[in-house]
Amino acid sequence: MIEGNNPSYDIIWDHSAKEDLRLIFEFNKSKFSNEFAQKINIEIYEVVGNIVFLKQWQKDEILGEPYRRIVVRHYKVIYRISDNKTIRILMVFDVRQDPSKYKLE
């Protein structure tokens, strides 16, 4: 369930965003439970997969255009639109972390 399934455009998860999700899963699994970790990751995937309009979510206040953000619980999903038919998920950031870590590589 990594790639999106919206018929009007593609949702692509960059490697770094997939790694962010893996780390989020491992953290939540160690602090809470496997079930809770799965629930959080599923929520993130579902919200991203249910994007209806390419510019449905707000511009990211730190990164600015062309970056947009989706907030799911304590996590900010950063994406950008490529060629008006592809959404690239670039990063998933826990907003409780040090903001200096909040940057794209």
Image (cartoon, rainbow, N blue to C red):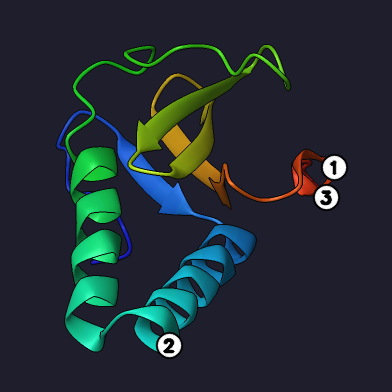
Marks 3 and 1: which is nearer the front?
1
Query: Measuring 17% from the left and 35% from the top, which residue is drawn there?
Result: 50
Q: Secondary structure at mark 1?
A: helix
Q: Is residue 87 above or below residue 17?
A: above
The residue to which callout 3 is attached is 105
Q: Secondary structure at mark 3?
A: loop
Residue 104 x/y as whole percent: 77, 43
- Gap between marks 2 and 3, in whole Å? 27 Å
Query: Measuring 66% from the left and 51% from the top, which residue is drawn there?
Result: 97
Q: Secondary structure at mark 2?
A: helix
The residue to which callout 2 is attached is 30
Furthest toward the front, the residue is: 31
- Gap between marks 2 and 1, in whole Å? 24 Å
* Dots 3, 1 in contact, CB < 8 A: no
* Dots 2, 3 in contact, CB < 8 A: no
In the displayed structure image, the side of residue 104 where residue 83 appears, left or right:
left
* Dots 2, 1 in contact, CB < 8 A: no
Quadrant in which residue 87 is drawn: top left
Give the class, few, some or many, for how many residues have Cα within 10 Å of label 1's Cα (few <14, many ≥20).
few
Residue 85 x/y as whole percent: 39, 27
Quadrant in which residue 102 is drawn: top right
How many marks are shown on the rendered structure?
3
Q: Is residue 37 above or below residue 64?
A: below
Q: Is residue 1 above or below residue 83?
A: below
- Gap between marks 3 and 1, in whole Å? 13 Å
At label 3, the amino acid type is: Glu
At label 1, the amino acid type is: Ser
The residue to which callout 1 is attached is 100
Q: Which of the labelled discs sits on residue 25, or is there none? A: none
